[in-house]
């Protein structure tokens, strides 16, 4: 009987011990799930900011073309007025215009003839009119092309639209700044973005074409460091390559070929890192195309011909975008 009691007690102790172990194991699972330790996804506002910067650069890049067309439009209007004065059209006062329909028709006919003789037609946009547009077109988030570019009556309207977008950037940055600070982004990247944004604002408000392009592009150089501690779909080398590629064109625009060579060398370093990742993913074809287009850009830089550099840069940007789409899947 004693043996039976002892066996029952032993069985109960064993059962309680097993239940205790199971309970402890469950408690240990709860405090720190793996998902809490994983980095958060990149905030959606980052893509919005990058898209807005590209949109700002696209608008600024059109300023020289618009300015030329506006000047031509004003010259045409002046020619019309001069011819109308010579023909004596439009010099009558309002009381004379009320002398009957025939009189009105006589006055209108010469004006319509002048309009048909001297007509303003906008010139097509050529490679000489634009600087970054072809490269920006390759990376634009909105791939729709504006088939009919309406020429504004004054360049002020173009800059007003640019400045409105810059103001919008400040609001988006305000949304992102607290998140990247919380994520542990470097103070250097945060301060750098803030300073570049302030300089961009000043340049755009002063209608400074080149400085606005430079500071817009500078903003993009801080993005990879700002999102460094988030879970990223896009490899960091892609962001850096795009920045240096645009910068090369800007350097060549002011004939600073030494700076362009330095930016090219940095681009190659990031390209090599990206190629290694592509080969690991067995994306050899994309890696080969990327290598070829980078080499072609190097040849163009040696020629020091801005138009050839722009063309080769746009081809390279298209290849970078193809890689971005592939690795983001």
Image (cartoon, helix red, strand yellow):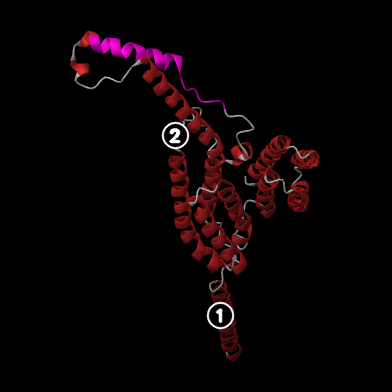
Residue 152 marker: 2
Is 137 located above or below residue 126 in the figure? below
Residue 90: x, y in percent? 31, 20
- The quarter holding residue 152 reads top left
Main SS of the magenta part reads: helix
Which of the two labelled residues, at mark 1 and mark 2, occupies the earlier sequence position?
1
Seen from this angle, which residue lies furthest top?
A: 102
Residue 27: x, y in percent? 54, 75
**Residue 141 can be seen, yes or no:** no
Residue 198: x, y in percent? 52, 59
- The quarter holding residue 315 reads top right
Q: What residue sits 41% from the left and 22% below the top?
A: 82
**Residue 168 can be seen, yes or no:** yes
Query: Foreground residue, 94 or 203?
Result: 94
- Front label number (1 vs 2): 2
Q: What residue sits 65% from the left and 51% below the top?
A: 239
> Which quarter shows the N terminus?
bottom right
Q: What residue sits 55% from the left and 36% below the top?
A: 143
Residue 10: x, y in percent? 60, 85
In what element is the residue under mark 2?
A: loop
> Where does the magenta region start and end?
103-124
Is 172 located above or below residue 76 in the figure? below
Query: Foreground residue, 158 or 324?
Result: 158
How far apart marks 1 and 2 lie (CA) works out to 79 Å
- Residue indicated by mark 1: 20
Circle 2 residues within 10 Å: few <14, some 14–19, many ≥20: some
Q: Is residue 107 magenta?
A: yes
Q: What residue sits 35% from the left and 12% below the top?
A: 110
Q: Is residue 91 left or right of residue 194?
A: left
Is 175 located above or below residue 274 in the figure? below
Q: Is residue 86 magenta?
A: no
């Amino acid at each position: 009987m004693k043996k039976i009691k002892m066996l029952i007690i032993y069985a109960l102790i064993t059962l309680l011990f097993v239940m205790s172990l199971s309970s402890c194991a469950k408690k240990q699972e709860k405090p720190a799930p793996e998902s809490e330790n994983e980095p958060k996804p990149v905030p959606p506002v980052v893509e919005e900011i990058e898209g807005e910067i590209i949109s700002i650069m696209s608008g600024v890049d059109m300023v020289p073309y618009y300015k030329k067309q506006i000047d031509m439009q004003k010259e045409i209007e002046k020619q019309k007025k001069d011819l109308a004065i010579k023909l004596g059209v439009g010099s009558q006062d309002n009381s004379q215009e009320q002398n009957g329909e025939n009189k009105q028709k006589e006055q209108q006919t010469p004006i319509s003839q002048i309009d048909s003789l001297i007509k303003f037609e906008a010139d097509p946009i050529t490679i000489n009119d634009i600087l970054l547009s072809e490269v920006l077109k390759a990376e634009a988030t909105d791939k729709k092309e504006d088939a009919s570019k309406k020429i504004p009556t004054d360049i002020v309207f173009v800059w007003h639209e640019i400045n409105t977008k810059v103001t919008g950037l400040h609001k988006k940055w305000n949304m992102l700044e607290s998140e990247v600070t919380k994520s542990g982004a470097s103070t250097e990247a945060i301060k750098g973005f803030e300073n570049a944004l302030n300089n961009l604002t000043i340049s755009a408000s002063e209608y400074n074409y080149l400085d606005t392009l430079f500071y817009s592009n500078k903003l993009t150089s801080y993005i990879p460091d700002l999102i460094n501690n988030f879970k990223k779909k896009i490899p960091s080398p892609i962001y850096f390559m795009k920045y240096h590629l645009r910068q090369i064109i800007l350097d060549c625009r002011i004939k600073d070929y030494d700076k362009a060579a330095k930016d090219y060398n940095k681009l190659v370093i990031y390209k090599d890192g990206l190629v290694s990742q592509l080969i690991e993913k067995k994306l050899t074809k994309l890696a080969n195309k990327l290598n070829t287009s980078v080499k072609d850009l190097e040849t163009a830089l040696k020629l020091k011909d801005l138009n050839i550099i722009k063309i080769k840069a746009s081809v390279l940007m298209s290849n970078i975008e193809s890689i971005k789409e592939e690795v983001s899947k």
